[in-house]
Amino acid sequence: MKLLFSTAIAAALIAALPACSQQPAGNEAAATEAAASLDALNGTFKVDLASLKFGGPPDEFALQGGSYSCASCTPPLTLVADGEFHAVADRPYFDSMSVKDVDDKTVEIRRQKAGKDVSSTVITVSEDGNSLTYKFKDMTTPGQTVEGTTTARRVGPATAGAHAMSGQWKTDKIGDYSEDALNMVFQVAGDTVTSTSQGQTYTATLGGPAVAIQNDPGGTTVKVERAGGGIKETYMRGGKDVGIATITPSADGKSLSYSGSDPRDGRTTQFTANKAG
């Protein structure tokens, strides 16, 4: 009660001041600061690959006896590894998948949705068996192709008698990435935020209901709210949270920091993006 009473008095004093000399105080100051900082979010920002940091549990795969499994996938899956496409359930972005054992160091994985290729990945293990390279091509978003490489390091023992890619791996870094796909575009007008990245766009009201992400074949929705000097995005599918991201621009608007997490498995991603131009 004391806090509410004090706040009411402060609000009354501010309202009594001449408009030209009013200075924000208390919660009003925070709101004004947040609004000003959101102006700094306007523009195109390019992800700095060197700043990427990954956290959470490792990836865990097994390829042995003609069977492939991914224990760290959400949800986990097991598939016949014969190079043919097989149906998979509960995957918003693909409905069939093929795993091909190319040789003792190489595996090729392809995914399709409704009979069309949506991604391909060639996984290559180093000669010493302690590092792994993913060379990927992603066509999940219609009209958008993203290509690149990712490296990972082994964090657990190799599985005896299994393919070299079997075991636990932690992502190290992104080696290269399609240039256009590194761009994040934000436009803030009042309480409306529009964001575009990798061919997908949303327009949401701060503090408003979740909205559909345009051009997202997985049917993901997002709601956006203020978070300190930036915004918080909560991504949902099927009524469940699948991702949370906090995006905060620097005071001068020349960069932003991104911190994302997946509440389903605790994986995290952090990076800095610099304003283009």
Image (cartoon, rainbow, N blue to C red):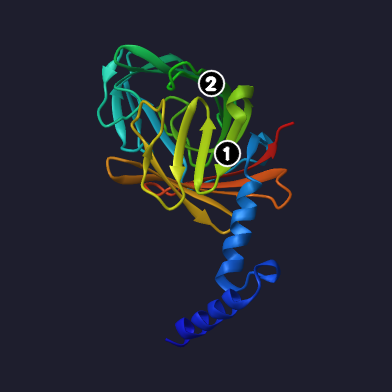
Secondary element at tag 1: strand
Give the percent coordinates (x, y) of residue 125.
54, 24
Amino acid type of the residue that numbered disc 2 sits on in the rendered structure: Val
Task: Report which residue position mark 1 lands on.
Answer: 187
Secondary element at tag 2: strand
Q: Is residue 4 visible?
A: yes
Q: Is residue 83 visible?
A: no
Between disc 1 and disc 2, whose residue precedes?
2
Give the percent coordinates (x, y) of residue 43.
64, 36
Task: Report which residue position mark 2 lands on.
Answer: 146
Seen in the picture, residue 147 relative to 69 is either above or below; the reply is above
Question: Relative to the observer, which residue lies in front, 62 or 255?
Answer: 255
Q: Nearer the viewer, mark 1 or mark 2?
A: 1
Give the percent coordinates (x, y) of residue 62.
38, 30
Task: Name the residue located 57 percent from the left edge and 38 percent from the top edge.
Answer: 187
Amino acid type of the residue that numbered disc 1 sits on in the rendered structure: Gln
Task: Name the residue located 30 percent from the left edge and 14 percent from the top edge.
Answer: 85
